[in-house]
Image: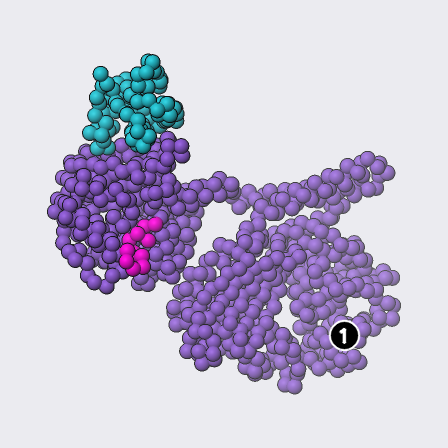
């Protein structure tokens, strides 16, 4: 085992391959004859095995080799795909993923050792699959005559077809033929060139040749197969043992589908004329019904009549796609964005200076520069945009496994996977989404029996959808389950004192209640959910991303939860306000309106901490006092009304300075716990402006003031409010302003 | 490395390959072969001075034979260097291209 650091590329690529393999296995479960999927499984294991071998990770090589052999058996139709096999291969894939994770740690050796027993068990099960060679059954119901009898030929038979590109890649089948002659005795060779196109189209540098070969004096199958290591994944190699059963030759004939193959087999003495006739009969019988396993499964192999195979086209397409993209270290991207941010600020400063001069040319030049800088900024930010596809596809596995665990049938429908968002957002969204999906499966979608009782199809439907809205991305998790039980929610809320009896709440508000901390209407706590910590955390995560959650539910029909988050956290559309000598930024999305605080209102506000806004009670927060700024307010004060999640508050500031788009700079760990501030930015004049954490501030105002958004007018003295912190209500009634 | 096509009056077209008959010469070799076959005259391959042959070369010999048969043109191999002989042998094609010099 190599002690050097495992290269990150190997780990990253292996993980990608494992994801591909998982998706392919899930596809195979639904359509066992999907040649593309089988090839994907084989390719993944073959590639990881090869790379592991290069780095000397023997454990990995051993394990992936076993999986590769099973995949090969499936590919040539000697092993049938069924649910237990897929489940086993999924488990093996997880094991390989675990091994890869081990490589990424410091105590790699110890961890790999620890993983051995589990690996040994899986290997045992894999070997068990290979033992009794379960063949894909031929379509005809009758047992084929003479199928079990071994042929007379006492040599190994190798049938090889190659990908067109092997010659260009420096792998000449001639070398294989020479090599085989060194490990055994080549009794006969029959060259096959059915695949060679017409003279005009024939590519002289591509390989159109294959062979049928009889080999004796070899120790075993391993030896022969090892020779074809490097050409296996794009070509098709079939190895039949001495005295192989006739139906294996029949399967080979069916697989290759070459008219001249029978003669070739005669020519190299693989079969006697009688045996050939019988084998052909078997294939005819097999063709009578729907395609049996053999030919269909190996469809990814080199097709005899055409020059290129489907897997080649796919390989080419994949290579082209890879050529169009470049792997970049995430840190480098962050550095670039940071620099671009500085560039934006610096150019804003220059603009400001230019504006002050009367030099027309200079002003024009800086305007042009600003435009370019903005384009650079947008381009840099777009580098971090990735489609949400990878996150969504991870859920295929989750839904599959969870559905099985819970005994529910669920179909996962994904749409809008190509929607792009900032890489950092993707990572932070995946946990909340996971929780929502698990909830939908656990509580939302009913069991097949319950669904049938309700007249629904037994298979539930879970939809993951993503799309853009101006400046934001919307990710929706929708199920066609039972919907939210409003009665139960209200009842629980009453029990927990979240609402008062007699209080009337809109449907939406009732739904939003499920996100209160500790809230759960689950009758039982399952291992999946029910403890009531989930939705609250989801909301906090989403709010931490400057996003919001909307819940929609129709009893009996289903629930849809929509997460709305900005496309990127790096840039903010802000509204500048001045308090004293400081400037603050309020996220523009949350600003509803601005008003001047009249002298009469100012007096009233001093007493009560509220203002009457067109009959609505608006709690106020004086930023000057919040941030403990020196000095006293000037003659004019303004109020910026913000709305967060349907709740409103007003921030009292001195000056309103207008809209401003800027790059957010994190404050650094020292200021992590600073409440009320979520970041900072640098203004054109070089000053630092703090960005207000509106959700937190609104929360603070409302809890202390316990105000409800839309009360009746004239009830300022006696607000009928949901109780927040108990003491606040009492203080309330004493006319205390919360602002002290 | 050279591939020369020559013709003596009404004699068969003769293609002589000197040096390599591999993937590197494949495109050129194919061009010569098809051009020669197009004339409709009998074709003779002189492969006595080939020092290296690979599957691409063998493939083109098969192509020539197939096309010749299709268009009813006679194809002979005049000489076979050891390199070509070995390659054909590996592929089991030696019998198919037994060298038989034309008078």
Q: Main secondary structure of the magenta part?
A: helix
Q: Quadrant of the C terminus of chain A?
A: bottom right
Q: How is the image coloured?
A: by chain
- The colour assigned to chain B within the rendered structure: cyan
- Circle 1 packing at 10 Å, graded few (<14), some (14-19), many (20+), is many
Residue A550 vs B24, above or below: the answer is below
Please state if A626 lies on the left or on the right of A428 as rendered. right
Pick whichever, A368 or A530, lies toward us. A368
Pick whichever, B83 or A109, lies toward us. B83
Residue A49 lies in what quarter of the image? top left
Subunit that carries the residue with mark 1:
A
Residue A574 lies in what quarter of the image? bottom right
Element type at marker 1? strand
Residue placed at 33% from the left, 53% from the top? A296
Please state if A455 lies on the left or on the right of A513 as rendered. left
Residue A348 lies in what quarter of the image? top right
Question: Circle 1 is placed at which residue position?
Answer: A617
Residue placed at 65% from the left, 50% from the top? A665
Q: Position of residue A676 (x, y in %)?
A: 67, 61
Q: Position of residue A80 (x, y in %)?
A: 28, 58
Residue A41 vs A438, above or below: the answer is above
Residue A445 vs B55, above or below: the answer is below
The chain displayed purple equals A
Q: Position of residue B26 (x, y in %)?
A: 36, 26
Residue placed at 32% from the left, 63% from the top? A83
Query: In the image, which residues are magenta?
Result: A287-299
The magenta stretch spans residue A526: no
Q: Residue furthest top?
A: B8
For residue A252, say whether it is visible.
yes
Q: Position of residue A520 (x, y in %)?
A: 52, 76
Q: Quadrant of the N terminus of chain A?
A: top left
């Amino acid at each position: 085992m190599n002690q050097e650091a495992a290269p990150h590329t190997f780990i990253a690529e292996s993980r990608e391959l494992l994801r591909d393999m998982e998706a392919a296995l899930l596809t195979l479960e639904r359509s066992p004859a999907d040649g593309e999927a089988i090839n994907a499984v084989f390719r993944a294991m073959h590639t990881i095995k090869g790379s592991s071998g290069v780095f000397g990770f023997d454990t990995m090589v051993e394990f992936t080799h076993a999986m590769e052999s099973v995949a090969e058996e499936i590919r040539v139709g000697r092993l049938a795909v069924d649910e237990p096999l897929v489940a086993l291969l999924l488990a093996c894939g997880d094991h390989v993923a675990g091994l890869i994770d081990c490589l990424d740690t410091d105590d790699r050796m110890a961890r790999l050792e620890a993983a051995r027993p589990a690996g040994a068990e899986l290997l045992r099960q894999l070997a068990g699959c290979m033992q009794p060679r379960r063949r894909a059954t031929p379509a005809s119901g009758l047992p084929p005559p003479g199928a079990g009898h071994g042929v007379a030929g006492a040599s190994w038979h190798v049938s090889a077809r190659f990908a067109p590109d092997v010659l260009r890649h420096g792998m000449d089948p001639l070398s294989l033929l020479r090599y085989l002659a060194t490990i055994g005795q080549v009794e006969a060779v029959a060259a096959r060139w059915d695949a060679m196109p017409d003279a005009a189209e024939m590519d002289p540098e591509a390989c159109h040749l294959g062979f049928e070969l009889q080999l004796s004096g070899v120790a075993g199958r391993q030896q022969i197969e090892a020779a074809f290591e490097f050409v296996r994944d794009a070509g098709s190699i079939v190895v039949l043992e001495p005295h192989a059963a006739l139906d294996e030759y029949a399967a080979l004939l069916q697989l290759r589908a070459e008219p001249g193959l029978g003669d070739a087999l005669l020519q190299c003495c693989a079969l006697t004329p009688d045996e050939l006739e019988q084998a052909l009969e078997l294939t005819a019988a097999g063709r009578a019904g729907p395609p049996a396993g053999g030919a269909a499964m190996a469809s990814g192999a080199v097709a005899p009549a055409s020059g290129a195979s489907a897997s080649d086209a796919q390989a080419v397409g994949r290579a082209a796609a890879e050529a169009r993209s470049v792997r970049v270290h995430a840190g480098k991207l962050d550095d670039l964005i940071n620099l671009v941010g500085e560039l934006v600020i610096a150019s804003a400063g220059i603009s400001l200076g230019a504006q002050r001069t009367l030099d027309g040319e200079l002003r024009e030049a800086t305007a042009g520069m600003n435009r370019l800088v903005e384009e650079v900024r947008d381009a840099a930010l777009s580098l971090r945009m990735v489609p949400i596809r990878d996150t969504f596809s991870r859920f295929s596995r989750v839904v599959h496994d969870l559905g099985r665990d819970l005994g529910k049938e669920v179909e996962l429908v994904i749409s809008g996977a190509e929607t792009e968002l900032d890489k950092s957002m993707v990572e932070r969204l995946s946990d909340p989404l996971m929780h929502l999906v698990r909830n939908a499966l656990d509580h939302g979608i009913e069991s097949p029996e319950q669904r049938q009782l309700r007249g629904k199809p037994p298979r539930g439907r879970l939809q993951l959808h993503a799309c853009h809205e101006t400046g934001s991305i919307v990710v929706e998790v929708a199920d066609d389950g039972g919907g939210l039980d409003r009665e139960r929610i209200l009842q629980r809320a009453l029990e927990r004192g979240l609402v008062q009896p007699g209080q009337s709440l809109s449907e939406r508000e009732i739904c939003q209640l499920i996100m209160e901390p500790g809230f759960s209407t689950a009758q039982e706590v399952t291992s999946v959910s029910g403890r009531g910590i989930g939705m609250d955390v989801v909301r906090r995560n989403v709010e931490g991303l400057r996003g919001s959650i909307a819940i929609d539910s129709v009893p009996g029909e289903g629930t849809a939860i929509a997460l709305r988050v900005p496309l990127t956290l790096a840039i903010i559309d802000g509204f500048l306000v001045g308090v004293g000598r400081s400037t603050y930024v309020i996220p523009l999305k949350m600003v509803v309106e601005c008003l001047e605080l009249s002298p009469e209102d100012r007096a009233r506000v001093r007493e009560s901490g509220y203002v009457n806004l067109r009959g609505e009670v608006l709690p106020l927060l004086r930023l000057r006092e919040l941030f403990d700024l020196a000095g006293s307010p000037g003659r004019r004060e303004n109020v910026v009304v913000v709305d967060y999640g349907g709740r409103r508050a007003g921030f009292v500031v001195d000056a309103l300075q207008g809209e401003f788009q800027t790059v957010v700079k994190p404050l650094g760990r020292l200021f992590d716990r600073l409440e009320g501030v979520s970041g900072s930015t640098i203004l054109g004049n070089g000053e630092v402006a703090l960005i207000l954490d509106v959700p937190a501030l609104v929360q603070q105002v409302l809890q202390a003031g316990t105000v409800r958004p839309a009360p009746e007018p004239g009830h300022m003295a006696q607000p009928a409010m949901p109780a927040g912190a108990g003491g606040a209500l009492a203080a309330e009634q004493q006319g205390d302003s919360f602002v002290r | 490395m050279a591939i020369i096509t020559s013709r003596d009056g009404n004699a068969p077209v003769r293609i002589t390959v000197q040096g390599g008959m591999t993937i590197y010469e494949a495109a050129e070799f194919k061009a010569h072969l098809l051009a020669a076959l197009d004339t409709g005259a009998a074709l003779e391959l002189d492969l006595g001075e080939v020092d290296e042959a690979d599957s691409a070369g063998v493939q083109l010999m098969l192509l020539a034979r197939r096309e010749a048969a299709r268009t009813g043109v006679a194809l002979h191999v005049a000489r076979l260097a050891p390199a070509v002989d070995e390659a054909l042998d590996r592929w089991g094609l030696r019998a198919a291209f037994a060298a038989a010099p034309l008078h």
